[in-house]
Image: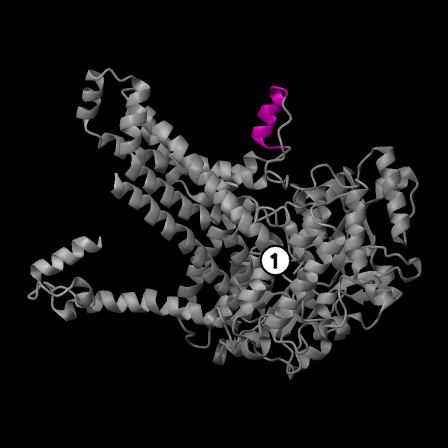
Amino acid sequence: MTTVTAAGRTATGSDATSPPTTRKRKPMKSPYPSWFFIPAGVFYVVLFLIPTIASFYFSLTRWTLFDVEFIGFDNFVRFFQEPQLVTGFVNTFIYAFLTSGAKVVLGLLFGVLLSSQIIGRGFLRATIFFPVLVSTIGVGILFKVLMDPFDGPINQTLAVVGIQGPAWLTDPSIALLSVALVDIWKGVGLATLIYIAGMVAIPQEYFEAAKVDGAGAWNNFRHITLPLLRPATVTVVLLSLIGGLRSFDLIWAMTGGGPGFTSDVLASVIYKQYQAGFFGLSTAGNVVLFVVVAAIIFPLSWWLNRKEADQ
Amino acid sequence: MVPRTTRRSIVALGAGGLALSLALAGCSAGDSESDGGAVELSFLVDNGESTVATAEALADAFHEENPDITITVETRPQGADGDNVVKTRLATGEMADLFQYNSGSLLQALNPDQTLVNIADEAYVDKLDENFIKSVATDDGVYGVPMGQSMAGAMLYNKDIYADLGLEIPESWDEFIANSEAIKEAGVAAPIVQTYGDTWTSQLFVLGDFNNVLAEDPDWAEKYTNNQAKYVDQPAFAGFEHLQAAYDAGLFNEDFASATYADGVSMVATGEGAHYPMLTFAASQLATTNPEAADTVGSFPIPGDDASTFGLTVWMPTYTVFVPQSTEGAKLDAAKQFLEFLTTPEACDIESEANAPQGPFVVEGCSLPDDVPAMVSDLQPYFDDGKTNLALEFLSPIKGPALEQITVAVGSGITSAADGASQYDEDVKKQAQQLGIEGW
């Protein structure tokens, strides 16, 4: 990225000999006058900059919405002492990596299937994408009913074939996994779509050349499709990981973090603090969430993109 | 935090949409200011069927007496989501002209001195029960009037099962466990019903035990507020201990983890379950789903370790009406007139009619109708003998918000009673600090 902009600057700049670093802060000559930026600038400051700065301030206060008391880092100390926070952290990572991994694998398989010449391809593609369009809360409430351990259609169906279904959402050891399963079902359509787009973009010439060299189906997949799908994989991994780390709505609709605290994730712990009126504490939680997501996603994104550039 | 009516997701979803449209309608109606002396008031209540019915019946009756004042009922969600709505609307000055909310510790979290209209000087306040006034007052003022009766946190039980097995009402915890074991052995019903599909229902073992705590230590509530008494220590620890003991003994219904409040009430009514620790506002749920069982479902206090102090833990009316400071001028006068109306016997009668009574009234001159359900009439002897104590949430402003999750964890065998109690102490500390109470 830097090389591109630096080159751009030297091309347009008057002093081509000065090193790019010293000119870093000077913008390149804009085709627009300054006042042209004012509307966007005002919205940006009011809607994004001020709230962000304010949230850092409020995370250091005991805040009731009515009055504010500055208490330093007490909120952060307390947040890390929350009994459910340790579970919340572990669960967040399990949930994020599980759903992300499953979406990559399943998305890839479905992508291969749905970019091949099969009957009703358009219909099948639409079908797998439908769950993405449905409201998450709706899906959550629906699956809560479906997964009821006694009256739920899933366990009643299993009972017909003689299997005693598990207590999907009320057994502490599998509640989180059940929610993750629904998340995967709901989100895999988007991953598939990205993979299909990636596959369509692979030039047919490669496959023709491989055919001349006598490559079979597996070799085609392993040595052409998979490497050339790398940008799609990076996108799917990043999107689903970010989604998984800050995931909340599905968990809240299905288990509310329960039973007890066993399926709590970071976002639901934070939400419960808001509900209880601990506004300063929950803002601190959001700052923590921001840092955690940034600490995972930035290095990962850098690593994935570097690998891509190396090739 | 416990006194909440049922939360059925699908109904709530529909009602949520309704609430939104009502709220929108309310806005446009409220904006067209009073012309020619006519005043329109908006009245925000939770979306429980019985709450809405009561509020509307009262609003209509009031309008008949005062034709130039019209009250429009708006609804909000119940539970913690509803708390959020109330707090946010108060903080932003967008509150309805009148609103219904809880008395006790939940009220304290609203910062009433700065957000609500003080009614301490109004004559009708003298008609209210002293304990009730305590639950809606701060050091600086009195803020609400009741819209309903007081109630008890009690053990609902199926009288038929008790009669069939020849059981006596247990006055101590050991007797209660012995009864439950006998029911388990007979195999006729689940000895104790728990319904963690609605998490708030899990708190009764702890909250309903408070009479026994006070019997042991009359100053416990004050010590607790001053950071000197903790749930990890006896006598308060007993509530957590009993919850774990009941789980360990396998006395709960098979589907305790997913059953809902409505399921629980039906189970005691039909004899699928023998005991259900619950607030007696369940009378209105019972009247809706199992009206034929009004005389089958009785109640007795949640027993403690000592039979000699057997008595009821009492809740002040959960439906309490407040006026926010954003209500001014003619609207404020009209709102105060409505509060006065709520303290008349006429209003009490409307409340008894719109909603099954759940306990004695706290307004002077009001009395219950003759045909109250058994679970309410069973309470009367304890009131008559003075064997009652207020629940903690009316004696201390501090109630930890995570109790319902903690008691679910203890009652499901995920957390031990000791760990649960210490988690709750931490939760209480957090709330106390947030409320700015000294000594924390």
Query: In which quadrant will I find the C terminus of chain B?
Result: bottom right
The quarter of the picture where residue A188 lies is top left
Relative height, residue B205 to residue B226 (above, below) = above
Residue drawn 85% across and 40% down? B160
Residue A263 placement (x, y as % from top left): 57, 46
In this orientation, which residue lies closer to the viewer: B270 or A222? Answer: A222
In this orientation, which residue lies closer to the viewer: B230 or A238? Answer: A238
Residue A121 placement (x, y as % from top left): 29, 24
Relative height, residue B14 to residue B401 (above, below) = above
What amino acid does circle 1 point to? Answer: Thr
In the figure, is residue B192 to the left or right of A240? right
In the figure, is residue B420 to the left or right of A86? right
Relative height, residue B183 to residue B398 (above, below) = above
Secondary structure at badge 1 equals helix
Looking at the image, the residue that sits furthest to the left is: A14
In this orientation, which residue lies closer to the viewer: B263 or A130? Answer: A130
The quarter of the picture where residue B192 lies is top right
Circle 1 is placed at which residue position? B51
In the figure, is residue A93 to the left or right of A166? left
The quarter of the picture where residue B428 lies is bottom right
- Was residue A159 drawn as part of the magenta stretch in this picture? yes
Whether residue B281 can be seen here: no
- Our reading of the magenta stretch's main secondary structure is helix
Identify the colour scheme used: one colour
In the figure, is residue B123 to the left or right of A91? right
Residue drawn 19% across and 20% down? A208
Query: In which quadrant will I find the N terminus of chain B?
Result: bottom right
Tell me where the magenta segment starts and ends, as one range.
A151-162
